[in-house]
Amino acid sequence: MIIHVVAPGETIISIANQYDVIPEQVIRYNALPNPDDLVVGQSIVILFPDVIHTIAAGDTLSSIAGAYNVTEDQILQNNFWIGDKNNLTVGETLVISYRRNEETDGEKLGSIVVNGYAYPFIDREVLKETLPYLTYLSIFTYGFTPEGELIPIEDEELIQIALDYGVAPIMMLAPMSADGSFNSAIAHDMFVNPEAQNKLIDNILANLKAKNYRGLDIDFEFVLPEDKQLFLDFITNVKNRLSPEGYIVMVALAPKTSVEQPGLLYEAHDYASIGAVADDVLLMTYEWGYMFGPPMATAPLNNVGTVLAFGVSQIDPNKILMGIPNYAYDWPLPFIKGQTQAEALGNMEAVARAAEYNVTIEFDPVAQAPYFYYTDAQGVAHVVWFDDARSMDAKFRLISEFGIQGAGYWQIMKLFPQSWWVATNLYDIEKES
């Protein structure tokens, strides 16, 4: 695999000719939003098909995998556009394997766990195209009442699709208000009410069993500092009840860089204590650039590395998942604190916007992230920070560098093929056995 950065004057045809590949394949592999209008500075993944199979009448994914002694997952990962694995098209070609270049690819760095977060309303085609690259699917999110009753979501279809693709569905729990925001009071009231807490855990366990979930993901943000021990006690209570039943317990943690880091987001998240109890922890290493904040990369590599360095000093690295954002932000300029609000968009939508305004994509060497400026039709200046194959490659290499378990994507609502090519080029992705 090669990551090519578009230079002035280049076209899909000229780039394909440079690497002796087929232009249509380059477009398909990258799901390019702008194949006829490439942007200077845009990254494009170049892949080299090695073994190819043409689908014949009667072929199934299972029969094709058996014929080439590969797994169904490998075929799906090599051909994300299949989408529905049970609906193959006769005459279409499938890539069984891609050629690895010793100089540019080297050996894979090992195997990793990958978790992806999704809302129940995710586009089903996007879901099916993404599941081959996931170990876990965390479905956002169950709430709960002060009495310990679960506030359910429509998750049955997502659970079944995940299981069909060999992905372990994970139930999520969060103290959310009716408006969808995290609520410290909801968490506190449950912490201090043992009867309600135990009833909540009873209901969680019953739901896990009834719906065939594989575990629970606890996402409690903005917990009151004075509830630090109560939060740990709750996690321990959950772990003691779920673990004997064979369920895993994950906990999402704020991106801390020191033990006593101040702030409502951080103080109740005790890395060492929570990490000792939970099976897995997601370090939410994103949202440095956020909707109401000043423009910057969402997950600057230097900041992510600082959080991971602190994380592995407090928690067993084999339990840690590095958070990865799968979205971009477009800020109108100038930024005015308390007034400016960025627009959220997908990474491929960001590239399409750069093409629309015929601007050049720049790349920040410290943040290891792409960005660009443009002026809209109303004369308003904008800056867009997003992710591409280069920034994803830098992030994924941190997994090996710090020896952690893997990554967790917030969220998989938008298709982003370049990230998956990078992930599978560097690692094998663990699947549910």
Image: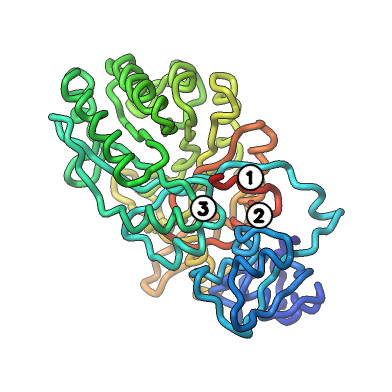
Residue 178 spot, x, y in % from top left: 17, 44
Residue 267 appears in the picture as rendered: no
Kindly identify which numbered label has been placed on residue 396: 1
Residue ID for mark 2: 422
**Disc 3 to disc 2, C-alpha distance:** 21 Å
Residue 194 spot, x, y in % from top left: 19, 18
Query: Mark 1 or mark 3: which is in front?
Result: 3
Q: Are marks 1 and 2 in contact (CB under 8 Å)?
A: yes
Label 3 crowd (10 A; few <14 / some 14-19 / many >=20): some
Image position of 45 (left or right of 278): right
Q: Residue at x 60, y 27 (%)?
A: 317
Q: Residue at x 53, y 61 (%)?
A: 416
Label 2 crowd (10 A; few <14 / some 14-19 / many >=20): many
Q: Is residue 338 above or below residue 354?
A: above
Question: Which residue type does callout 2 highlight?
Answer: Val
Kindly identify which numbered label has been placed on residue 167: none
Precedes in sequence: disc 1 or disc 3: 3
Residue ID for mark 3: 166
Precedes in sequence: disc 1 or disc 2: 1
**Element assignment for label 1:** helix
**Element assignment for label 2:** helix
Quarter in which the C terminus is drawn? top right
Of residues 179 and 276, the one drawn nearer to the viewer in this rendering: 276
